[in-house]
Image (cartoon, rainbow, N blue to C red):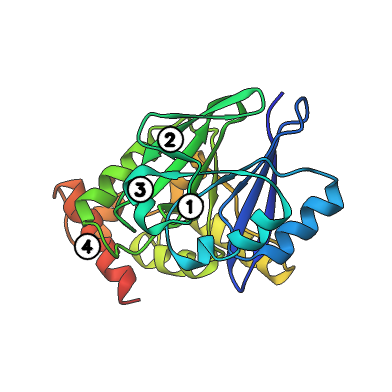
Amino acid sequence: MPLEIVTIPCLSDNYAYLAHDKATGDTALIDIPEAGPILDELERRGWTLTHILITHHHLDHVQGIDAVRAAYPVKVIGAAADAHRLPPLDILVAEGDSVQIGGETGRVIDVPGHTVGHIAFHFPDSHVAFTADSLMALGCGRVFEGTFDQMWDSLQKLAALPPETLICSGHEYTAANARFAKTIEPDNAALISRSDRIDDARAKGRPTVPSLLSVELQTNPFLRADQPGVQKGVGMEGAPANEVFAEVRRRKDAF
């Protein structure tokens, strides 16, 4: 039975996620922007939190951990390479390591770029990946600590997951990302249609994440740096995809 995924809005534009295994009762929390909404959701559903999975060290992804830990005796899982600046970890993981939530085994993916210690968690049986600020809905995280090449390589790892994978990213940036994406691929029909759906969802106060990887592959310019439409959009026809990606990211930084 697949994990049940719950999206929890936090702060002004963050998301945390619960992943619940009905058979065992195990419940994992992915990132902790603030404790209140997470604790409220657990209480409302009658779930007991058993694990916390941390994607990276930025404050808006970890600052609620003390209050959540005070309420539940959880195991906290995070990147060994970043342990020196994460909250205290019970389990240290790296690329290729496994994470067990109830009956399902997840895999750790090293995705540096936004930070050098960023990781993602892929649960293949449930067709879900928790990517936080690496691959985002119609975007990717700003390259703060790593290099453009690192971020491109990270995105390529995530793009290689099965297309039916649900991408659970960390922020409600999708409307702004769509406006930027249309400056790169103004004739992308799938992008135009998606942008309209995003505007409708936001007007009704609905989240635009998670999103399907198959949709990201059709519309997200940061995944499409090897496509003629994106290369034409930045005047770099035939250039190496990593260089095109870097130009797209620079343009987004200035957008």
Q: Residue at x 70, y 71 (%)?
A: 203
Q: In the picture shown, does residue 178 fall above or below 222? A: below
Q: Position of residue 115 (x, y in %)?
A: 33, 57
Q: Which mark is residue 108?
A: 2
For mark 3, what is the residue?
223
Identify the residue at the far left of this view. Answer: 239
- The tag earlier along the polypeptide, 3 or 4, is 3
SS at mark 2?
A: strand
Q: Which residue is mark 4?
A: 247
Nearer-the-camera pick, 154 or 96:
96
What whole-number distance in Å separates the C-alpha atoms at marks 3 and 1? 34 Å
Q: Amino acid at mark 1?
A: Pro
205 on left or right of 213: right
Amino acid found under the numbered disc labelled 4: Glu
Q: Residues within 10 Å of mark 3 (few under 14, many from 20)?
A: many
Residue type pointed to by label 2? Val
Residue position for label 1 = 88
